[in-house]
Every structure is written in structure tokens, then in C-alpha cells.
Image (cartoon, rainbow, N blue to C red):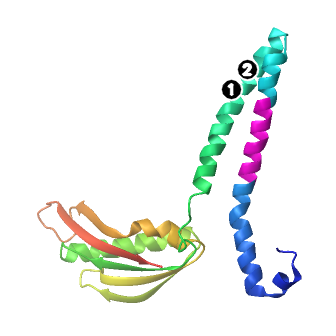
Amino acid sequence: MLADPAVSQDGEELMRVSKARAAMEEVVLTYDEWLKARGELDDATQMLYEETDEEIREMAKLEISELEENIKDLEKKLQVLLLPKDPNDDRDVMVEIRAGTGGDEASIWAGDLVRAYSKYCESQNWKVSILSSSDSDSGGYKECVLQINGDRVYSKMKYEAGVHRVQRVPATESQGRVHTSTATVAIMP
């Protein structure tokens, strides 16, 4: 399809076909590798039954056990590759972080989460920008909304959604008691 002149002249269609080809390439290569291993297994099995030399039969047995293990690994890999992909995995995200229970310490915890996610995004070479925020008096955030742009952001961030809890002695505690604070994280593609 990539060689079709109509496809190469239409930029959007070319990009769509290129992405589809790239998505299938690993599946096809793994399947070809599996077919090759199956053929080698058949050859080794045939050699085991037809050969009279005991040394060659031992080599065939060893090769058969290695090939069977390799085939099992390739089948597992193919099963994972053939699972349906989340259509949002390639999208950018908006992350909303809100302080939950815990008063000032919860807003400090929300600020810690904003900084942690920002550093993670930098390590992934993603662009982070704060769309809106409401600062708290204690130095954190009551709420903060981040826009994260980059390669496959949603696929790596989608499982971060939910309530995040921390138990620690807060800077706001004078008696050294452990407090529990929460913050909610929402991930939107």
C-alpha cells in the first residue's frame, strides 16, 4: 500500500498506512520467527527418528528441547502482541491533581505529586505545562491541572489515576505524629 501513488500523494493517508504497517511489523516478524522455529523443530524431530548414530540423536534431543522452549516464548510474545491496543495510548493527556483529606499536609502532598510527575515527564522527554493551579498557603497545591505532550503519554500515565495516599510526619506537625494525607489524580486523554 505504501507504494501506491494515491497513498503517497495523500499525506494523511500515508501517515495512517505507515502507522498501521509499523503496528503490525513486530507481529509479522515474531510470526516469521515462530514459523522458522517450527520448521527447525520438525527437521530435528525427523532427524531424531531417522538417525542411527547415537551422538547425533543426542544433539537432536538437545536441539528439540531448546526449540520447544523458544517456541513457547514466541507464542507468549505473539499472544501479547495480538491483544487489542487501547485506541487512546498514543494520545497526550491532561492530569488533574487535587488535594484530598489531610488539610495543609494534603496540599503539600499534591505539590509533591505535581513535582514528581513533572520530573517523570522530563525523564521521558515529554513537554509539561501547567494549565491552571490553585496554590495553598502551605506551599503546595489545592488543585493543579497539567497538560502533558509527547510520545505515547496516555499509555504510560493511564494507571496513575486514583487516590494517592501518604503517611508521614508532616512539616506542619509539631508533636512528631504520623498523619495520613491523600490527593486525587485524574488522567484524561
Q: What residue is at 71 percent from the left and 78 percent from the top?
A: 16
Mark 1 and mark 2: Cα distance apart in space: 6 Å
Determine if the magenta segment contains residue 105.
no
The residue to which callout 2 is attached is 61
Left or right, 18 with respect to 128, comes to right
Give the x, y percent position of residue 20: 70, 70
The residue that mark 1 highlights is 65
* Amino acid type of the residue tagged 2 in the rendering: Lys
Question: Which SS class for mark 1?
Answer: helix
Residue at 78 percent across and 31 percent down: it is 42
Residue 122 % position (x, y): 54, 72
Cβ atoms under marks 1 and 2 closer than 8 Å: yes
Q: Is residue 96 above or below residue 53?
A: below
Taking depth in this image into account, of 126 and 4 the one nearest to the observer is: 4
Q: Is residue 159 left or right of residue 109?
A: right
Depicted 77 relative to depicted 146: above or below: above
Quadrant housing residue 66: top right
Q: Categorize mark 2 by other alpha carbons within 10 Å: few (<14), some (14-19), many (20+).
A: some
Where is residue 7? Give x, y as percent: 82, 82
- Magenta includes 31? yes
Type of amino acid at the residue the image marks with label 1? Ser
53 sits to left or right of 83? right
Q: Which residues are magenta?
A: 29-42
Question: Any mark on residue 147, and which?
Answer: none
The quarter in which the N terminus is drawn is bottom right
Q: Secondary structure at mark 2?
A: helix
Dot 1: few (<14), some (14–19), or many (≥20) neighbours within 10 Å?
Answer: few
Where residue 126 sits in the image (x, y, percent)? 56, 75
Task: Count every numbered label the image shows and give the total.
Answer: 2
Vertical side of 82 occupied by 88: above or below: below
